Image: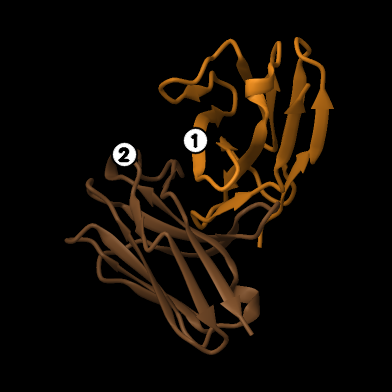
Chain colours: A brown, B orange
Amino acid sequence: QQPVQSPQAVILREGEDAVINCSSSKALYSVHWYRQKHGEAPVFLMILLKGGEQKGHEKISASFNEKKQQSSLYLTASQLSYSGTYFCGTENPGSSNTGKLIFGQGTTLQVKP
Amino acid sequence: GAVVSQHPSRVICKSGTSVKIECRSLDFQATTMFWYRQFPKKSLMLMATSNEGSKATYEQGVEKDKFLINHASLTLSTLTVTSAHPEDSSFYICSARDLYEKLFFGSGTQLSVL
């Protein structure tokens, strides 16, 4: 079943922060985050494998709450280059270690000068 | 990071013809590759899992005879859209997983069926 992302869209000014959430009705083995720019393929941001895990990549970080079956992506001090559509991809325990991901509907982020 | 190459990037074909899309993992071996389809401003929809040396596993609702998948080697998977129709027009993307469980995507193929 497809995970649910919120919000669907967000508009920011450069330097502002944003949070994108990803929730699943099923137990999760892992959560993957990707960013896609128009007309391009999705680009890997990070993967979270353990409940309670948090990871950071420059000014982009994420958390994974296994009990709540949800993950959040945190974008701090946003830059123009952060604009794009963000997808979470979830892997369920039944399909763990196969790489089979089901993607959320996406969150469109627009950063304005 | 790992590199996944996908060709062609864009193809226009006539209705009724078949189109083959290639997906290669350039610097790692991938026993499993995935094929996704994406409509404009929509999410990535998993079509099938391509398994090296065995039959592909299709998701519910995906026609096996319409979308033929062949995974002949550890670095190559192909998707053939047979007897294409305008409703098959879409953005098709392949992906492959490396040893660290990261999924890398090809650059995608925009298929337009006239």
Position of residue B3 measured from the top left corner of the image (x, y, whole percent): 71, 53
Crowding at label 1, few (<14), some or many (≥20) Cα neighbours within 10 Å?
A: many
Give the quadrant of the C terminus of chain B: top right
Position of residue B53 measured from the top left corner of the image (x, y, whole percent): 59, 23
Position of residue B58 measured from the top left corner of the image (x, y, whole percent): 48, 23
**Residue closest to the eye, A53 or A21:** A21
For disc 1, the marked residue is B46
Residue occupying the point 49% across, 54% down: B101
Write down the chain letter for disc 1: B
Residue occupying the point 76% across, 14% down: B15
The answer to whether any part of residue A72 appears in the image is yes
Rendered image: mark on residue A1: 2
Q: Are marks 2 and 1 in contact (CB under 8 Å)?
A: no
Residue occupying the point 69% across, 13% down: B82
The quarter of the picture where residue B32 lies is top right
- Secondary structure, mark 2, is loop
